[in-house]
Image (cartoon, rainbow, N blue to C red):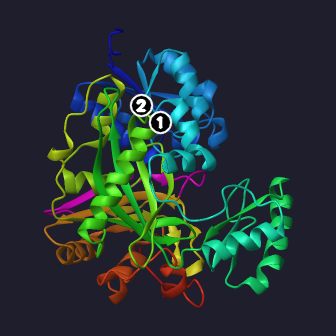
């Protein structure tokens, strides 16, 4: 039997707060970290905390953080043993994972086969079906004719969602609430899908009206151990981008919580999954849940789970990649108290959330019991316009959800980021609404209720 890989030095193939998060984990584990950076990130304060930093190209991501040859060259120059991709960029790129391992660098994530399998909707659904994980009712595949579509719609019941078989991003997607409009909606969806993807194929699913988005954190090692670390509620979204996450999911009955977590573990086992991942579900008003997808990487919101379980998920990722078994069993995973995360973005809610990069002239970081600030920014740091607008994650942990909301409002009031506009005021507004306090939000709530009739807020100072 081959010896497990010995990891002593890790290339952090990412930037910003997740790069800093991995660097910190390496330091605590006695490992060396090698940061990479683009010209746009040159001089970023967190780079000084790595044992070494290597420039990999110009500001655009295609010339740096998405450039596989340059990342591999940096790994070879630094003589690392493993590569941590973080989230975003190449974290779910099966080719990158395959290249890393072909070059004898451990990829701190799932095997490339699992990433590829979970990235294909049809294969992921087939795995879920084999594992007896609930799926949204719909056609088995693309529907060949309008008559077939009518029969499927009658079988699953209205409203139905017409979706393009190829691509995504909402292209070729239509909601149809009654049979009279189905054929017209199909024709429109086919035309849009053909224009966007050169493929007019469509399939049908039951439309889940005003669903909640609940995801389960998973850990799996190469020794056959698979556990869940409970669930997170991620329903507060704008244009499919998460704003606030929390755990436990409010108002979710304990028996549903248990069933949804067990379903996620079954799916991971069936897929032969290894390392950290997240199984995502839609939950309807009757607490029926349906599999959406697997995110084959660490998530932005992983600290929410860390706060309620006490498990360092990045540390577990590194240990798993090194061939070690999980440090905890399922029986050892608690769900203590309540955690909330607010994503702080450099965006201007007053002007349709336009990006607001620039120089940070002042910064006051919240503190006190139960407060966590995950961010790479500092006074004098210039937020570049090249990347995602998230500049920090503000988290709180408290014995109850009511106390967690109060703690988050206090922490948001303490937070001061000067020189740029942020979404902090938006979060304060959300946390004070009766719907949020009572757990009555869904994935459409922000745009349907909070920002209706137009996406504009009172002037803010973030």
| Image: 445 above or below 39 | below
Q: Residue at x 43, y 78 (%)?
A: 426
Residue 217 location, x and y as percent? 35, 50
Q: Residues within 10 Å of mark 2 (few under 14, many from 20)?
A: many
Confirm whether the magenta stretch covers residue 459: no
Which of the two labelled residues, at mark 2 and mark 1, occupies the earlier sequence position?
1
Tag in front: 2 or 1:
2
Helix, strand or loop at mark 2: loop
| Image: 139 above or below 185 | above
Magenta region, residue range = 366-388
Residue 288 location, x and y as percent? 42, 70
Q: What residue is pinned by disc 2?
A: 108
Q: In this rendering, would 218 be left or right of 139? A: left
Image quadrant assignment for residue 139: bottom right
> Are dots 2 and 1 in contact, CB under 8 Å?
yes
Residue sitting nearer the eye, 276 or 299: 276
Residue 339 location, x and y as percent? 25, 64
Residue sitting nearer the eye, 393 or 239: 239
Asked whether the viewer can see residue 375, the reply is no
Q: CA distance from mark 2 to mark 1?
A: 7 Å
Q: Which mark is residue 85?
A: 1
Screen quadrant of the N terminus: top left
Q: Which mark is residue 139?
A: none
């Amino acid at each position: 039997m081959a010896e497990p890989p010995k990891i002593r030095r890790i290339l952090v193939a990412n930037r910003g707060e997740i790069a800093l998060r991995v660097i910190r984990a390496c330091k605590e584990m006695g490992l060396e970290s090698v940061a990479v950076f683009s010209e746009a990130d040159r001089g970023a304060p967190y780079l000084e905390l790595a044992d070494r930093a290597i420039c990999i190209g110009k500001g655009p991501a295609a010339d740096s953080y998405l450039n596989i040859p340059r990342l591999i060259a940096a790994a070879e120059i630094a003589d690392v043993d493993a590569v941590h991709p973080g989230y975003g960029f190449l974290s779910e790129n099966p080719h990158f994972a395959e290249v890393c391992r072909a070059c004898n660098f451990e990829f701190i994530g799932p095997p490339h086969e699992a990433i590829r399998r979970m990235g294909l909707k049809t294969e992921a659904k087939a795995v879920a079906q084999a594992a007896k994980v609930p799926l949204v009712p719909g056609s088995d595949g693309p529907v060949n004719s309008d008559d077939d579509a009518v029969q499927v719609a009658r079988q699953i019941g209205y409203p139905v969602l017409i979706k393009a078989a190829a691509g995504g991003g909402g292209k070729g997607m239509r909601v149809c609430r009654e049979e009279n409009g189905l054929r017209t909606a199909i024709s429109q969806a086919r035309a849009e899908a053909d224009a966007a993807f050169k493929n007019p194929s469509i399939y049908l699913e039951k439309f889940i009206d005003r669903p909640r988005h609940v995801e389960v954190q998973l850990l799996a090692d190469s020794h056959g151990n698979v556990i869940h670390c409970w669930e997170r509620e991620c329903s507060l979204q704008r244009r499919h981008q998460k704003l606030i996450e929390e755990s436990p999911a409010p108002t979710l009955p304990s028996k549903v919580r248990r069933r949804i977590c067990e379903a996620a573990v079954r799916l991971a086992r069936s897929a032969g999954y290894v390392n950290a991942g997240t199984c995502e579900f839609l939950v309807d008003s009757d607490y029926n849940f349906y599999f959406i997808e697997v995110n084959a990487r660490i998530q932005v919101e992983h600290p929410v789970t860390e706060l309620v379980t006490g498990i360092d998920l990045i540390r577990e990722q590194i240990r798993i990649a090194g061939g070690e078994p999980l440090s905890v069993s399922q029986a050892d995973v608690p769900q203590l108290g309540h955690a909330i995360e607010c994503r702080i973005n450099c965006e201007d809610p007053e002007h349709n959330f336009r990006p607001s990069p620039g120089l940070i002239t002042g910064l006051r970081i919240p503190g006190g019991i139960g407060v966590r600030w995950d961010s790479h920014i500092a006074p004098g740091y210039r937020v570049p316009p090249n990347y995602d607008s998230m500049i920090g994650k503000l988290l709180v942990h408290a014995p109850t959800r009511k106390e967690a909301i109060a703690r988050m409002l206090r922490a948001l009031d303490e937070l001061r980021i000067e020189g740029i506009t942020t979404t902090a005021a938006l979060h304060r507004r959300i946390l004070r609404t009766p719907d949020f306090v009572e757990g009555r939000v869904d994935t459409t709530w922000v745009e349907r209720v909070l920002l209706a009739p137009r996406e504009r807020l009172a002037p803010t100072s973030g």
